[in-house]
Image: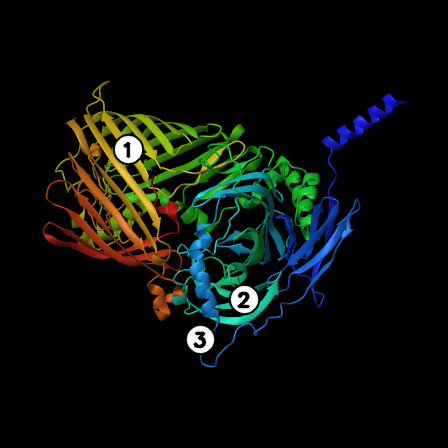
Amino acid sequence: MRSRLLSTTAIILLCAIAFPAQATRVHGKVFDSRGFLLPFSSILVKGTTKGATANAQGEYALDLEPGDHIIAAQHVGYQTEERQVHVGQDPVELNIVLKEQVLSMDTISIRAGGEDPAYAIIREAIKKRPEYHKIRTRYGCDVYTKGQINLMSYPKSILGQRVDFGDGDTSKKKMIYLSETQARFTAEPPDKQKTEVISTKVSGQSDGFGFSAPQVIDFYDNNVNLTRGLNPRGFVSPIADGALQFYRYKYMGAFFENGRQVNRIQVIPKRDYEPLFAGYINITENDWHIHSLQLELTKNSQLEFLNKLKLEMIFFPVQGDLWMAQSQTLYPVVTFMGFNGNGYFTSIFSNYVIEPELQKGFFDRTLVHYDPLSNKRDSTWWSLNRPIPLMPEEVADYRRKDSLEHTRQDPHVLDSLDHIQNRLTPVGLLFNGQTLSRRSRKASFRYDPLFKAISFNTVEGWSLQMAGSWEKELAAHKKLTIDPVLRYGIHNGHFNPYLSASYRFGKFNDRELTVAGGSRIYQFNNENPIPQVLNTFTTLLDGHNWMKFYEARVFSVNYDHATGKGFTFRVGLSWQHRMPIENTDSSSYWGSSSHRERLTPNWPVEITTENIPVHDALLFSAQVNWRPGSRYVELPDRRFNVGSKFPLFGLQYVRGLKMLGSDVSYDRWKLTMQQNINLRLAGEFRYAAETGGFLSKASLQTPDYIHFTGNLTRKAGPYLNTFQLLPYYERSGVYDLYAAIHAEHHFNGSLTNKIPFVKRLNLRLIAGTNMIWTGKNDPYIEVFTGLDNVLKILRFDYVWAWDKHGAYAQGIRIGIYAFGNLFNDQ
C-alpha cells in the first residue's frame, strides 16, 4: 500500500513538472461610459509587461495563471481603469468601462495674452528627447501584429482590364487582406535588430508570410520614418529638436494616472504641405515622457498614396526611466482610381526583457528569420496564442478563403480563372505587353507590346520582332526561363532567330546559369542607348537614324551567384561572329523631304569613317558586386537581400581572347559605385560614379570601345546612366583611363511646398549634373534642373551642356515612368 502511494505521488509530481498549471482565459469587452465599444483598447496585467489589445469590436482575451491579478485597460482619450480579478480554473468574463478623461486646467495658470502653457511642456520634452533616445538599451519583446484591409467600393475595370478578385464575390464591400503574426523582436540601438517569426497566417494563402517585420515607430527620433512609400522625407516629430519651427501647440488640460500628472497637448502644423502630424500628444509632468498619442497625416502632410493615416500609440514604464510602446495601431484610408478602402494594422508589444542574454553573433545579416513551422501552425495553436480575438467577419473570411484556396488547387478551376484573367486588352496589346498565366502548370508567358514588335530603321526597313519570356516554376523554388526572339527585316530580307535559356537554383543563395545563342542585330553600344520605338519615329519624321547596328552570330554562357554576404559574382564567356550591315531603305518617309539629307551611314559617324570588317570576338568577362552591410529576410527555404545604407560597389573585367580564330585581344576594367542617400527633410541625393580603362589594346573593334550612354531624343534616358544631350558615340574611344559621374538631388517638396499652386500638385524640384573625363583635357559637363512627380508619371528637366569650348547644347528632356517595357530593349 505504501509502495502504491509512493508510486502515485511520484506520478503526480512528474505530471506537475511535465504539465504545468494550465492558464485560464480572462475575456470581455471594453466600453465607454455611453455603452459604445472601444476598439483596440490596450490591456495590461499590472506589474508585468504581459498584455493584449482589444479587437475592432472591443473584445479582448488574456490567458493568466491562477491567482489574483490587476487588469489595467487604456484607450487614448479615456481614463485608465484598473480591475482586480481572481483567476481560478474556469474562464472569467470581465467587461470594463472606461470614462472619458476629465481634463483639469487647475494645474497650470494661464495668463491672458501670455504664451500657451503647452510650449513650456514641449520645451521640456524636447530637452529630454536626446536623453530618452539615448537611454534605449538592448531589449527583447514579443510582438503580435494583425492587419486588415477592406474595400468599400471599386471600379468594374481599369484601362479595359476587368477587376476580378477571383473570389466569386461581386459585392462592392469586401475584406481583401487579413493576416496575423507572432514574433520575438530584439533590438540594440542604434541600428541592430532582429525579428524571429514564430507564426504567421494570411487568409487564403496557406504558404503566405504576411507583414511580419514589426515597425516600431519612434517619436524620440527627430524624423519619424513611416516607410519610404508614404513620404521619402519622413515626418517631423512633435518633440523634434526643431519642432517649434514647424508646429503650434495648445494646452488642453491634464489628467492623473497612478498619481502621475499627464498633460494633453494639441499639435497643430504651422503650414500646409509640410511633412507634419496633427492631433494630440500626452506628456507626463516632471519627467516629460510620451505617455500616449493620437496623431494623423493627410494629403496636406505630403502623404503619398494614402488619403489619410491615423496613428495611436500607448507607452508604459518598463524599467526606471525606460518607457516602451505597449500598443500601436495604424488606420490607413485610400482613394485611388476608383478604389476606396480602409483598414488597420495593430501591434501589441509584451513580455519585455531588458538587456537579454544573447548568443555571440546573434545580430548577424539576418533581419527577419522565419521558423520552419511559421506558416504551418493550425487553428488550435492560434486560438491559444492569439492576443486579439477574431471578429465574426474575420473568422468567416479565414474559412471562406481557405476553402476557396483548396478549391483553386483543382486544375480545372485554375484554368477557368486563367481564361478570364488572360483576356487580351488594348493597353497590354499595344503598350505594355501582357502576361498569360497557366497556374495549374506553374507556368507563364509574357509577350512584348505591338508598338515594340513593329519598328523601322534604315538597315532592315520595316522589321517584325516576336519576343517574349516563358517561365516555369519548379520544385524548391527553382525556375526555368526561356526567352525566344524572332526578328525579320522586310527590306533587307534578314531573319535573325535568337534563344536564351536560364535555370535558377540554390536553396538560400540564388544561382543562375544562362545559355544563349543564335543570330541577332546589336547596337554598336551593346547597352542599347536608343530604344527602337524612338528610333522609328526620329528616322521617319526627322531623318535621324541614330541607331547603328551590326549583325552577329552569337553563343554565350553566364553563371551568376549571390553569396548571401552582400556579394554577387558573375562570370561569362561569349563568342560573336560580327558582320557589318549597311543602309538599305531610305524611301519610307513621313517627314519633310529635306530631312532625308540628315540620314547617315550605318556606323558611328562621330568616331569613324567606315564600317567594321567581318571578324570574330571571343570574350571572357568577370564581375563582382558588393554592398557592405547587406541585410536579409530569411524564409524557411530562401533568402532575400533587402539592401543596406552603404554604397554598391562593382568591379568588372573583360578580356578579349586571341584564340580559336578570335580577332580581338585586349584587357578592359571598370570600377563602379552607386548609392541613394536619404537626407530626410532635405531630400534625397543619388549618384553613380565609374572609372576604368584599357590595360592592353592590341586588337579591338568599335563594339569593344568604351561607350557612354548618350541621348538626342526628347524622352529622357535612364537617370544615373545617361548623358541627356550627348550624341550617342561622340565620346566613345579607347582610353587608358576615364571617369564619369551622374549625380542628382531630389528635394522631394522641401522647396516647392512653399509655392502656393505648385505645392497642391506635390511637384518636386530636382537638380543635378553629369560629367565625363577621358584624360584628353576635354571634359564634358551637363547641369540640369527640373520638376518630378508631374501627374505621378512624368518628369521634366532642362539641361545645359559644356565642353572645353564652352556652351555645347541645351534642351528639354521628358521622363516617362509608365510603359517601361516599351522603351527597354535589353
Query: How is the rendered protein coloured?
Result: rainbow
Tell me the distance, in whole angstroms, between the alpha carbons under discs 2 and 3.
16 Å
Q: Which residue is mark 3?
A: 115
Q: Which residue is mark 2?
A: 263
Q: Earlier in the sequence, mark 1 or mark 3?
A: 3
In the drawing, does residue 46 fall left or right of residue 791? right
Tell me the distance, in whole angstroms, between the alpha carbons under discs 2 and 1.
58 Å
701 or 672: nearer the eye?
672
Give the amino acid type for the residue marked by disc 1 in the picture.
Leu
Q: Quadrant of residue 331?
A: bottom right
| Residue farthest to the top, as pictured | 660
382 or 561: nearer the eye?
382
Query: Which part of the image, by quadrant, shows the C terminus?
Result: top left
| Residue farthest to the right, as pictured | 1
Q: Position of residue 711 (x, y in %)?
A: 24, 48
In the drawing, does residue 375 fall left or right of residue 793? right
Please tell me how crowded label 2 is: few (under 14), some (14-19), or many (20+) other residues with Cα within 10 Å: many
Which is closer to the viewer, label 1 or label 3?
Answer: 3
Q: Which residue is mark 1?
A: 651
3 or 441: nearer the eye?
3
Q: Secondary structure at mark 1?
A: strand
Q: Is residue 528 visible?
A: yes
Q: Position of residue 357 (x, y in %)?
A: 53, 36
Q: Earlier in the sequence, mark 2 or mark 3?
A: 3
314 or 82: nearer the eye?
82
Tell me the distance, in whole angstroms, between the alpha carbons under discs 1 and 3.
61 Å
Q: Is residue 300 visible?
A: no
Q: Secondary structure at mark 2?
A: strand
Q: Earlier in the sequence, mark 2 or mark 1?
A: 2
Circle on res. 182:
none
